[in-house]
């Protein structure tokens, strides 16, 4: 007989169960039933995770705008470094 490994539940899952238990609106047996239903839903929909390739919910990044901003900041840093040098103050670079 092999030893069964301990189950590792995600923090989000644990929080959801703990909140349901704290509310007191469900008994432990009802929570166990709910957990069983979540597991069944996961098994039914697990294939959807891998369908259709990667789905990104993040908006597309405008690289041109980012490069423009980097250039602007580099120019400002160079200007300020020169101004500090002329004023006799230490440079920000070390």
Image: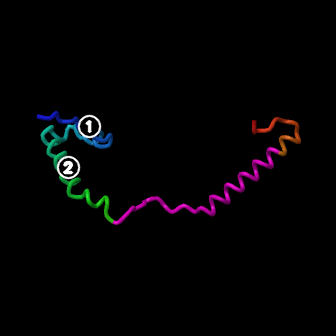
Residue 61 vs 32, above or below: the answer is: below
Q: Which residue of the protein is positioned furthest toward the bottom in this rendering?
A: 52
Quadrant position of residue 10: top left
Residue 90 position within the rendered picture, expressed as x and y whole percent measured from the top left: 82, 35
Neighbor class of circle 2 (other Cα within 10 Å; few <14, some 14-19, many 20+) is few
Image side of residue 94 versus residue 55, left or right: right
Residue at the disc numbered 2: 39
Q: Nearer the viewer, residue 50 or 31?
A: 50
How many numbered callouts? 2
**Magenta span has 82?**
no
Q: Secondary structure at mark 2?
A: helix
Neighbor class of circle 1 (other Cα within 10 Å; few <14, some 14-19, many 20+) is few
Residue 3 vs 86, above or below: the answer is: above
Q: Nearer the viewer, residue 55 or 16?
A: 55
Magenta residues, dominant SS class: helix
Residue at the disc numbered 1: 18
Q: From the image, state whether disc 2 or disc 1 is nearer to you.
A: 2
Q: Residue at x 11, y 34 (%)?
A: 1
Which mark is first along the chain, 1 or 2?
A: 1
Residue 94 position within the rendered picture, expressed as x and y whole percent measured from the top left: 75, 36
Q: Secondary structure at mark 1?
A: helix
Image side of residue 10 versus residue 67, left or right: left
Image side of residue 42 versus residue 2, left or right: right
Stretch in magenta: 52-81
Q: Residue at x 22, y 35 (%)?
A: 6
**Magenta span has 54?**
yes
Residue 64 vs 31, above or below: the answer is: below
Residue 50 position within the rendered picture, expressed as x and y whole percent measured from the top left: 31, 60
* Marks 2 and 1 in Cβ contact (< 8 Å): no
Q: What whole-number distance in Å separates the C-alpha atoms at marks 2 and 1?
A: 17 Å
């Amino acid at each position: 007989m092999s030893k069964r490994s301990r189950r590792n539940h995600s923090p989000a899952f644990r929080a959801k169960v703990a909140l349901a238990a704290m509310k007191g609106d469900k008994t432990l047996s009802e929570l166990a039933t709910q957990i069983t239903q979540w597991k069944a839903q996961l098994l039914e929909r697990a294939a959807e995770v891998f369908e259709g390739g990667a789905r990104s919910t993040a908006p597309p990044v405008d690289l041109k705008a980012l490069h423009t901003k980097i250039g602007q900041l580099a120019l400002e840093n160079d200007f300020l470094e020169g101004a500090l040098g002329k004023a006799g103050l230490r440079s920000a670079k070390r």
